[in-house]
Amino acid sequence: MEVILSVIISEFSDFNDLSEFIILVVRLLMAILLGGLLGLERQQSGKAAGVRTHMLVCMGAALFVLIPQQAGISDSEMSRVIQGVIAGIGFLCAGSIITGKDDQAATGLTTAAGIWFTAAIGIAVGLGREQTAVLCTLLAWLVLYVVPFFSRSISNKKAALSKPKKDRSDT
């Protein structure tokens, strides 16, 4: 029984000390928060990839970086890990893009870009670049939330200008 207990304890000894555990918890919670902020906007816009998807993508990307860091891999090996995360997220993003019948209309591009960007934020958090991750989240939120107001305004003005005026002789 003592052997079994010692094996179980050794299997659950990922952390060398309490500070390592706290770093992991803080970074994963930060990834959940930042991913959730971006996902909230997508969900409010009625998109399929909402809060939970963005939280999981951000936290997953952070975890894919945190685990190799715990194992002590080199910078060149970390570069390959990041490349793998980016490629893997690309497949998820591709699934969110739908092309129309005429092959000219594609929907889901902004959602795909948001998922991709959320993964990048997760990587930044996982690498301990929290300030960069927060700044990028705020900038992405501006793009997703504020820019549509301007683009709608421009579209409405274009539509008003292109609308044919009534001929006065018809009245």
Image: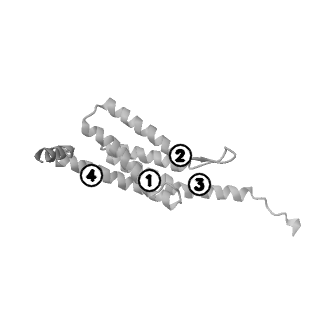
Can you identify the residue that label 2 sits on?
A: 95
Where in the figure is residue 44, as x and y percent of width and height?
50, 61
Can you identify the residue that label 4 sits on?
A: 25
Q: Amino acid at mark 2?
A: Gly
Residue 149, relative to residue 92: is it above or below?
A: below
Q: Is 171 on the left or on the right of 154, as rendered?
A: right
Q: Mark 2 and mark 3: span between their CA atoms? A: 26 Å
Can you identify the residue that label 1 sits on?
A: 53
Q: Mark 3 and mark 1: span between their CA atoms? A: 26 Å
Q: Amino acid at mark 4?
A: Val
| Figure colour scheme | one colour
At label 4, counting other C-alpha atoms closer than 10 Å, the crowd grade (few under 14, some 14-19, many 20 or more) is few
Q: Amino acid at mark 1?
A: Thr
Q: Do callouts 3 and 1 mark residues in contact (Cβ within 8 Å)?
A: no
Which element carries disc 4, helix, strand or loop? helix
Which is closer to the viewer, label 3 or label 1?
A: 1
Q: Mark 1 and mark 2: span between their CA atoms? A: 13 Å
Can you identify the residue that label 3 sits on?
A: 151
Residue 61, relative to residue 147: is it above or below?
A: above
